[in-house]
Amino acid sequence: MKFFGRAWCASIALAGVTTVAVQAAPAPILIKSCTVAKPKPFSHLAGGTQISYVNLGKYTAASVTFVVGYRNAEHNYLRRTTDVGSFAPGATIVHKLTLYNDVTYAGASTTVCRPIQVKWAGGTIWVAPSH
């Protein structure tokens, strides 16, 4: 019983030091759309990936890395791509990237499309929490 009492007192003493709850910050990038582009005429290969997103952060982003899944085969076709540029806060960005231009086109839908890393112009980095 003495041990329980000491442990409880110790936890109360520590609780006063660490009362701030740590919560995962929401992603600073909002995906508006993410689709695989149709092939060029006389081709069966996808024409890249078009991602439309908004920088919800307070600072200009220098690069945004996405993970994108395609063709209902998350393990086989889950890839990363990075969009590099200068993306102002509140700006909507629409870019066609070369991601998935080397696979047979199987429709525009993606299975996953989310930001996993943002490098801010000031040098700091946001990384998505692990799932």
Image: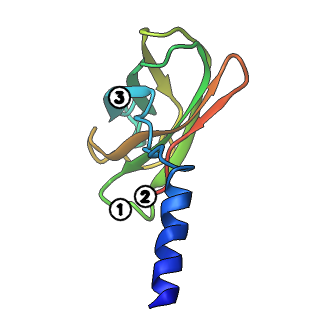
Residue 105 in picture, x, y percent from top left: 35, 45
Tag 1 residue: 73
Q: Which circle marks residue 131 in the picture?
A: 2
Q: On screen, 35 above or below 53? A: below
Q: Position of residue 95 (x, y in %)?
A: 46, 20
Find the distance from the CA under tag 2 to the CA under tag 3.
18 Å
Graded by Cα atoms within 10 Å as few (under 14), some (14 to 19) or many (20 or more), the crowding at tag 3 reads: some
Between disc 1 and disc 3, the foreground one is 3
Lower position in the chain sequence, tag 2 or tag 1: 1
* Whether residue 95 is situated above or below residue 44 in the rendered picture: above
The answer to whether 124 is drawn above or below residue 105 in the figure is above
Q: Nearer the viewer, residue 107 or 116?
A: 116
Percent x, y of residue 116:
51, 41
**Viewer-side label of 2, 1:** 2
Three-letter residue code for mark 2:
His
Q: Residue at x 68, y 27 (%)?
A: 124
